[in-house]
Amino acid sequence: MTFPNFNRFVLRWKRLPGKPSAELFQRSLQIIAHRLKNETSARIGLCSLAPIGEDLLSTDPFQSALNRHIRDFSAIITDTALEEGVGYIPVYETMIATMQDSPRHGFTSFRFLPFYRDTLRVLALRKSPDEVARMNGWQFHTDGVHMNSRSGMIVANLVQEFIDSY
């Protein structure tokens, strides 16, 4: 993947069996979907990934790589849902379409300090995640990664549509 410091963190924290990759993701998702489909009576729905950052046409190397990874991994999810014959919830596609006409705000680096700062704003200063989003200049995120209520409602509505179609 593109972000070595994040990869090292995830390998240790999540105890992954190997370096994060599209192949590992695809194999793991197929196993999960297959087992859920065959070992439960639940209706299974896989949802694509929400964008990280909001600059869909960014030339910034970091944001551009994120856009590419999210698009590629969402395609893996789509393909897996089709191959396994399970439902699909188009979070990525819907959020991209919704973001098209919004101001562009890129996520151009991964640093822990802003996440801690925003946590302090919520917990100690009693700011809502939406207030933090406005402070940071985001339309759909609180910090470029985590969704605010606007994007959360998009996902909630898509999941509700999936449930209602059952």
Image (tube, rainbow, N blue to C red):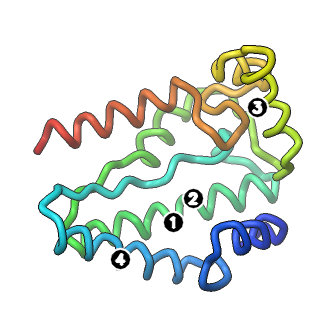
Q: Position of residue 73 (x, y in %)?
A: 51, 66
Q: Secondary structure at mark 4?
A: helix
Determine contact: label 1, label 2, CB under 8 Å: yes
Q: Secondary structure at mark 2?
A: helix
Q: Amino acid at mark 2?
A: Ile
Q: Position of residue 46 (x, y in %)?
A: 33, 58
Marked residue nearer the N-terminal end (1 or 3): 1
Residue 119, which numbered label?
A: 3
Q: Amino acid at mark 1?
A: Phe
The residue wearing badge 4 is: 30
How far is the residue under mark 1 from the one under mark 3? 28 Å
Marked residue nearer the N-terminal end (4 or 3): 4
Q: Is residue 134 left or right of residue 89?
A: right
Of the two numbered discs 2 and 3 in the rendering, the one whose residue sits closer to the viewer: 3
Q: Is residue 103 above or below residue 61?
A: above
The residue wearing badge 2 is: 70
Determine contact: label 4, label 2, CB under 8 Å: no
